[in-house]
Image (cartoon, rainbow, N blue to C red):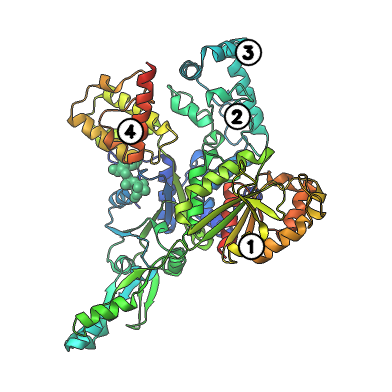
Amino acid sequence: MAQFKGTERYVATRELEVAVNAAVALERPLLIKGEPGTGKTVLAQEIAKALGYPLIEWHIKSTTKAQQGLYEYDAVSRLRDGQLGDPRVHDIANYIVRGKLWEAFEADHPVVLLIDEIDKADIEFPNDLLLEIDRMEFYVYELRRSIKARHRPVVIITSNNEKELPDAFLRRCFFHYIRFPDRETMEKIVQTHFPNIRQDLLREALTVFFDVRNVSELKKKPATSELLDWLKLLTIEDMPPEALRSQDNKTAIPPLYGALLKNEQDVHLFERLAFLTRRKV
Amino acid sequence: MFAPFIIALRAAGVPASITEYLALLRALKAGVAGFDVEDFYHLARAALVKDERHLDRFDRVFGEIFKGLESPPGTAETTVEIPAEWLRKMAEKFLTEEERAQIEALGGFDKLMETLRQRLAEQKGRHQGGSKWIGTAGTSPFGAYGYNPEGVRIGQEESRNRRAAKVWDKRVYKDLDEDEALSSRNMKVALRRLRRFARTGAATELDMPGTIGATARNGGSLDLHMVPERRNAVKVLLLMDIGGSMDDHIRICQELFSAARGEFKHLEFYYFHNCPYERLWRENRRRKETEKTTQEVLRTYGPDWRLVFVGDATMGPYEISQPGGSVEHWNEESGVVWMGRLTRHFRRAAWLNPVDQQHWRYTHSIGMMQGLMENRMHPLTLAGLESMARELAK
Ligand SMILES: Nc1ncnc2c1ncn2[C@@H]1O[C@H](COP(=O)(O)OP(=O)(O)OP(=O)(O)O)[C@@H](O)[C@H]1O
Ligand SMILES: [Mg+2]
């Protein structure tokens, strides 16, 4: 079986590789947690590419129900068709809407199934999917038949930790927590996105970036995606590295900071800090 | 063969089960980890730990159990490399003239680093691995540096030595452990817990009037409308022990709950001193003007309010049990009577105690209060906050 490894597009630590390969080998879900922007969602795409499987993505919202992943019976459409005298109304199968799990189970090639941000849903959500993910099978009452996975999909589940997940659910998963990348790893990540970036610019930018992250009062700390956006702007503007250097990075406003600080209050905070240092000088 | 490992993990509070143990064995058999110890460490962790808060405990147990499994010749058991250059830079950046002079007085940087290394080693030897004095500003010379092991690695310029220290010995997940006291540092996480508690239920419900209206407009063809369920139904009454040793904790609690204010339907604060009696007040500085009788509080807030006490419950036993036991006024009725009234009225109540839970049993009054609370006292830690929330959500 193909193994998952970091690629020129995605930097994977050895611990991440081990966790992914364990989950793939044992056909168990892999639960991925970590700060926003640490590459949880992208990981599933990379795993799919590495294994050569198609990716099916199920993005969870606060209103998502477990049943929607299996199938939904669209009673309202049927009622409407009934009122309009549409002949389709006689076959209930016309009103069964397949969910992502169904899609993944019936695919004639193994797939990677991403259940993204599972913690967004109601607290019961993971429990409701327990059996189906375990047995890779479920029953459709309306059609009186069960849907069984032809190939067990590789299931990747991400969570931002908004809700606790039930123990029974956790016991069935492998788990990996992506730590916020240290400078060295971050340098590699940036290089996968900007292979031709000027080294001196990168160095200065990373210093500013980690300094900004160190300001503890920030409401939202910039993460990888913000850094990448910012670097893109810096390169487009052809910003000289010197422009990033300043006496005290902690309190100066970095150029094009709009890309790093998305929160209005944080921008104000920075402006205030910069004002204070300017007065001190 | 790893049974002692699993047992030790469980003893350390990592809830690894047989299911997970078997998964680990199977993965080993499938050759996921090869023969590399570090791989084995990663694999065991992915199989046995399901919560980042437990990663640090896992690291400690792993280090303990697999001691000597891999000690490359020449590396001492507890080496953690602290690059001198980095320390020096940090010092230059953050220390005042005066502080630098103090360092010189301690014997200079080299001496300081030697001490730091020793302390780290000692600290690792102690089993709870708390960071009581390394990193505590003021009490330890290292506090001024804002020293933390992770910080060291960020500034590390050469990675020559990185493999020398074992990964699990680096304890990089320490900050995620929950048994740490509530502080401004872990406030964000705490807040998330609290919010989760404030938001009950989710989803949508059928909007009957909307549906009927729309269906009628539609000429009788069904047109369903949904509305979000009402959220933020939770009302919280916070009673806080004010004065003396409690001030810092009270401030943090107040900040915490205030920050979550938007999430609660209602949130009210009152103060007491040591033990609640017949009077509570809203502002400590204007105590007299803002005073209310406890009876009135009981009348004002219905039983659907959640009652949360914050206090160390540390006092003379008579302050709880005796009429007139209060240290600052004559109370006609004892604390026991008042606690009884409060907990009977507010069915859902909890007590948050900043005192380290391990020490509770040494203080008689804590035990008494715990009894009056019917064991619903929780430590003022992230985990405690979580268990309080679970308790109150019932
Ligand atoms: N290890 C990595 N290698 C390469 N790119 C990465 C890596 N980690 C993150 N990125 C980049 O960072 C950005 C954010 O990643 P992604 O959206 O997957 O994060 P996430 O953890 O899912 O965040 P959220 O919790 O906000 O959903 C993407 O542009 C991604 O390409
Ligand atoms: Mg994502």
A46 and B124: which one is in front?
B124
Q: Looking at the image, is mark 4 or mark 2 nearer the viewer?
A: 2
Q: Is mark 1 on a helix, strand or loop?
A: helix
Q: Looking at the image, is mark 1 or mark 3 nearer the viewer?
A: 1
Is disc 2's CB within 8 Å of ligand 1?
Answer: no
N-term mark: 3 or 2? 3
Amino acid under label 2? Thr
- Give a yes or no on whether discs 4 and 2 share a subunit: no
Amino acid under label 1? Leu
Q: Residue B298 carries which label?
A: 1
- Give a yes or no on whether discs 1 and 4 share a subunit: no
Task: Check the residue under mark 4 and report the chain it is in.
Answer: A
CA gap, disc 1 to disc 2?
42 Å
Residue at the spot of label 3: B106
N-term mark: 1 or 2? 2
B2 and B198: which one is in front?
B198
Residue at the spot of label 4: A188
Lateral position of residue B278 relative to residue A58, left or right: right
Q: Is residue B213 visible?
A: yes
Give the farthest residue toward the front: B289
Q: Looking at the image, is mark 1 or mark 4 nearer the viewer?
A: 1
Q: What element carries label 2?
A: loop
B320 and A4: which one is in front?
B320
CA gap, disc 3 to disc 2?
18 Å
Instruction: In the rendered view, tell whether residue A219 sits above or below residue B292.
Output: above
